[in-house]
Image (cartoon, helix red, strand yellow):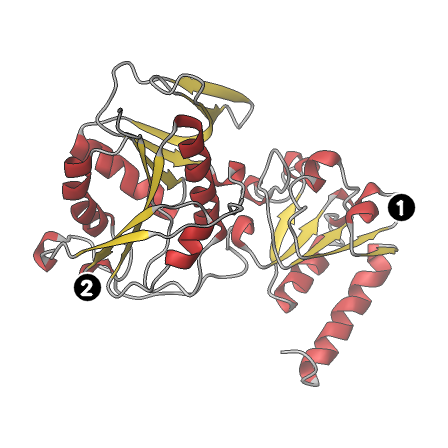
């Protein structure tokens, strides 16, 4: 009987994390989907200096086993420390696929591991065709996400390394959870071998945090980015510590940076609170906000499609409502009604 294909997944979690990120849950879901397609098993990799027990949440996403790497040098992410910890186990087990997110950890760690293992890497992958598991086809965005590039390994590598585009990951817990077999590994990393060390930690700035990870988003459409209104949008976002998002037309006008675009062709978001200002509600934008907790919309057109997808909506002119809303929030904060 052939050995099941082993899919390893590196969710971005360790002992210093208060909770598991949406990116990590999306990676676990993707790994489970791949395993089901190729008849494989999923092993999660968790690194830290005193790692909590994540077996319950891992089981909820179809993980059958986990390798927990514990060492003082793994308290915070370091590509040198992580690769040193993982290398020996990867050379020993030779997993079929190692899946990471195309984010802070994956972008730095994956190329280093690929070089050490002398294997191939598909970065920023958007889709995987597993109709022929012996020769998977990987697709990544190119030319500003307008086209796909198809990548196929010419020869079967020992391990395929893939970093997934966070925008394509969906969070899908499994219907039935199982027990996760956990193996503790203590790599005993030499401090002298780690060239880059963690010195300090700075909390994420709500103004610069990736909108895909933001808890509060103020999204400005074409109706909210005039020279008169955009400063008010920024002031409102500052008051409630919201990350600014936007739509494709605003990006095309160069009003807000491209990495802030939300929608099916931008970033899929799931904040606790989403406020849409001057956004009509085109299908490709609404498709990117459906997992939001509370959606509040303001648009002067009472027939705007965005209202059909909102929990609360106001048909009003932003020039009238934004100054009053800002003043009300300022007064509430100064009175201690809100923090």
Q: Which residue is mark 2?
A: 72
Label count reads 2
Report the quarter where the C terminus lies: bottom right
Residue in the image at 9% along x and 57% along y = 190
Q: Is residue 135 above or below residue 18?
A: above
Of badges 2 and 1, nearer the viewer stands: 2
Residue in the image at 11% along x and 59% along y = 191
- Picture quadrant of residue 118: top left
Residue 229 placement, left or right of 112 = right
Residue 75 placement, left or right of 141 = left
Residue 260: x, y in percent?
58, 45
Mark 1: few/some/many CA within 10 Å (<14, 14-19, 20+): some
Q: Nearer the viewer, residue 149 or 168?
A: 168
Provide the secondary structure element on which disc 1 rests.
loop
Residue in the image at 43% along x and 39% along y = 32
Q: Looking at the image, which residue sits at the far top?
A: 154
Provide the secondary structure element on which disc 2 rests.
helix
Report the quarter where the N terminus lies: top left
* Mark positioned earlier in the residue sequence (2 or 1): 2
CA gap, disc 2 and disc 1: 57 Å
Q: Which residue is mark 1?
A: 301
Residue in the image at 12% along x and 55% along y = 189
Mark 2: few/some/many CA within 10 Å (<14, 14-19, 20+): some
- Picture quadrant of residue 130: top left
Residue 274: x, y in percent?
68, 55
């Amino acid at each position: 009987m052939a050995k099941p294909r082993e899919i390893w997944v590196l969710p971005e979690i360790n002992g210093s994390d208060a909770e598991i990120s949406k990116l990590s849950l999306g990676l676990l879901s993707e790994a489970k989907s791949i395993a089901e397609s190729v008849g494989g098993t999923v092993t999660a990799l968790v690194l830290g200096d005193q790692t909590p027990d994540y077996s319950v949440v891992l089981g909820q996403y179809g993980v059958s086993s986990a390798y927990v790497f514990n060492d003082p040098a793994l308290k915070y992410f370091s590509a040198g420390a992580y690769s040193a910890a993982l290398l020996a186990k990867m050379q020993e087990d030779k997993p079929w696929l190692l899946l990471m997110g195309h984010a802070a950890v994956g972008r730095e760690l994956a190329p280093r591991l690929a070089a050490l293992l002398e294997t191939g890497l598909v970065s920023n992958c958007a889709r995987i065709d597993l109709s022929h598991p012996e020769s998977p086809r990987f697709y990544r965005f190119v030319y500003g996400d307008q086209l796909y590039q198809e990548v196929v390994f010419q020869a079967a590598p020992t391990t395929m390394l893939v970093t997934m585009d966070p925008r394509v990951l969906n969070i899908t817990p499994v219907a039935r959870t199982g027990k996760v077999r956990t193996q503790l590994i203590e790599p005993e990393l030499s401090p002298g071998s780690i060239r880059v060390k963690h010195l300090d930690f700075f909390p994420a700035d709500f103004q610069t945090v990736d909108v895909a990870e933001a808890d509060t988003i103020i999204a400005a459409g074409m109706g909210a980015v005039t020279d008169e209104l955009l400063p008010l949008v920024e002031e409102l976002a500052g008051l409630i510590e919201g990350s600014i998002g936007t739509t494709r037309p605003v990006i095309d006008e160069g009003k807000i940076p491209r990495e802030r675009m939300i929608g099916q062709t931008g970033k899929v978001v799931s904040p606790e609170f989403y406020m849409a200002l001057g956004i009509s509600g085109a299908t490709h934008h609404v498709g990117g906000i459906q997992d939001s907790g509370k959606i509040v919309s303001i648009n002067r057109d009472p027939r705007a499609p965005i209202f059909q997808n909102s929990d609360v909506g106001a048909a009003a002119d932003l020039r009238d409502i934004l100054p009053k809303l800002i003043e009300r929030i300022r007064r509430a904060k100064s009175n201690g009604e809100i923090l």
